[in-house]
Image (cartoon, rainbow, N blue to C red):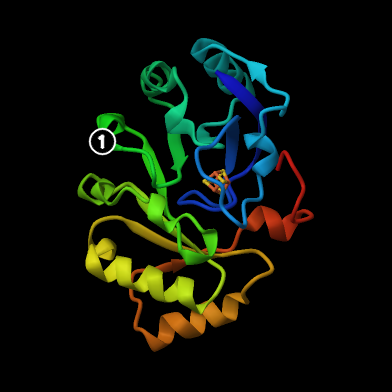
């Protein structure tokens, strides 16, 4: 499996935000979002470490950190992802999150005791037409749908999807700003105006703690 970077930091943007987490960032993505902040990891010439699923587990184990975030790129497109999940899920001390971009079928993965954070790509990403809407039939209570919003059009799209699928009754729902494109207070105003109960505004903690474009945090 091709790993673009691996590191320990705090979880910046998910259910365990603020807690220590070990991150495994896979190389390569099938999308090309306008605001992508990890595009470097999706390029052909990005240096990557070739690790087996067991090597990855050994690294995770060596850190002593119990929250694991598999990210990318797109983790669910990795050839050996199921082997890795078999290994990680057999260690009951770990809490595993997978960040997935909403275009890949999650059905083959819902048998695993992991928490999926699935994006819905709003219009400013340029990737809305790549969203696989059948995924909303499989989303579970411990999963999260995340809307990264850069403007009011994005917020309206998020609201429409949240309502259409009654997401707040099914799973976690997060709205996160495109860093530098929209003020968080404008998101709060939109949430108030539209009575968005059960929706969480989430700021990307790592971008507030470190320089916004810093890698490995
Ligand atoms: S899905 Fe994620 S990694 Fe892929 S291009 Fe979009 S933001 Fe970047």
Question: Regarding mark 1 in the picture, which secondary structure is present there?
Answer: helix
Picture layout, residue 57 above or below residue 7:
above
Q: The N terminus appears in which quarter of the rendering?
A: top right
Q: Is mark 1 within 8 Å of ligand 1?
A: no
Q: Name the residue under label 1.
A: 107
Q: Is residue 71 in view from this perspective?
A: yes
Residue visible at 66% across and 28% down in the picture: 44
- x, y percent for residue 195: 34, 83
Q: In which quadrant of the rendered view does residue 82 lie?
A: top left
In the picture, measured across the screen, residue 211 lies left or right of residue 171, that is right
Residue most toward the left?
A: 137
- x, y percent for residue 19: 57, 46
In the picture, measured across the screen, residue 157 lies left or right of residue 6, that is left
- x, y percent for residue 109: 30, 31
Residue visible at 44% across and 17% down in the picture: 80
In the image, 41 versus 93, the foreground residue is 41
Picture layout, residue 37 above or below residue 126:
above
- x, y percent for residue 48: 68, 22
- Count of marks placed on residues: 1
Residue most toward the bottom?
A: 193
Residue visible at 60% across and 64% down in the picture: 178
Residue visible at 43% across and 22% down in the picture: 81
Q: Is residue 94 in view from this perspective?
A: no
Q: In which quadrant of the rendered view does residue 10 lie?
A: top right
Q: The C terminus appears in which quarter of the rendering?
A: top right
Q: How crowded is mark 1: few (under 14 residues within 10 Å), some or many (20 or more)?
A: few
In the picture, measured across the screen, residue 203 lies left or right of residue 48, that is left
In the image, 106 versus 205, the foreground residue is 106
Q: In which quadrant of the rendered view does residue 168 lie?
A: bottom left
In the image, 117 versus 35, the foreground residue is 35
């Amino acid at each position: 499996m091709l790993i673009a970077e691996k590191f320990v930091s705090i979880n910046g943007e998910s259910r365990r935000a603020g807690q220590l987490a070990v991150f495994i960032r896979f190389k390569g993505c099938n999308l090309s979002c306008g605001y992508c902040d990890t595009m470097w990891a999706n390029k052909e010439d990005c240096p990557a470490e070739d690790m087996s699923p067991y090597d990855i587990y050994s690294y995770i184990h060596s850190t002593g950190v119990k929250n694991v975030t598999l990210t990318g790129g797109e983790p669910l497109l990795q050839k050996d992802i199921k082997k890795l999940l078999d290994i990680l899920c057999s260690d009951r001390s770990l809490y595993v999150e997978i960040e997935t971009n909403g275009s890949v079928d999650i059905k083959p993965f819902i048998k695993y005791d992991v928490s999926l954070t699935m994006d819905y790509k709003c219009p400013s990403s340029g990737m809305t037409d790549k969203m696989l809407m059948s995924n909303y039939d499989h989303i579970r209570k411990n999963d999260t749908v995340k809307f990264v919003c850069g403007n009011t059009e994005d917020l309206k799209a998020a609201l429409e999807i949240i309502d259409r699928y009654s997401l707040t009754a099914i799973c976690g729902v997060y709205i996160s700003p495109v860093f530098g494109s929209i003020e968080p207070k404008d998101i709060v105003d939109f949430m108030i105006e539209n009575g968005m109960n059960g929706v969480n505004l989430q700021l990307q903690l790592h971008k507030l703690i470190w320089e916004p474009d810093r890698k490995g945090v």
